[in-house]
Amino acid sequence: MSQWQEIGYGLEAKLTENNSIWVRNQGQQSEHPHLIVTINNQNNITGVQPSDNQATMGSIEGTLLILSQVKDKLLKIQTVN
């Protein structure tokens, strides 16, 4: 499992042992809550799932917009580790 890395917009992400990308608020001390982001082979975000019902970051539209803005950083985390 990789270390948490800043991705912008007050968020940080890491790659887990099963190749899931977790995203949480930057500086958060615990693993939960977080979002689980899925990226397919064509480098498209295909899924965003909360770890629990506290893992919201505003509206789904706002969350997807932010994740689309940081997608390059998420891909870098996924390919480097």
Image: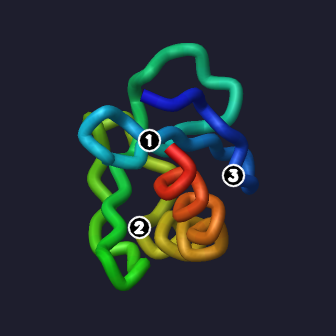
| Label 3 secondary element | strand
Q: What type is the residue that disc 1 sits on?
A: Leu
Residue depicted at x 32% and y 61%: 38
| Label 2 secondary element | helix
Specify whether 69 is left or right of 81: right
Which label belongs to residue 15?
1
State how far apart marks 1 and 3 are (Cα): 13 Å
Where residue 56 appears, x then y in whole percent?
Answer: 42, 47
Specify whether 4 is left or right of 6: left
Which label belongs to residue 60?
2
Viewer-proximal residue among 81 and 49: 81
Quarter occupied by the N terminus: top left
Residue depicted at x 39% and y 46%: 35
Would you identify the image quadrant in which residue 13 lies? top right
State how far apart marks 1 and 2 are (Cα): 22 Å
Residue for badge 3: 7
Q: What type is the residue that disc 3 sits on?
A: Ile
Viewer-proximal residue among 65 and 79: 79
Specify whether 52 is left or right of 30: left
Where residue 67 appears, x then y in whole percent?
Answer: 54, 66
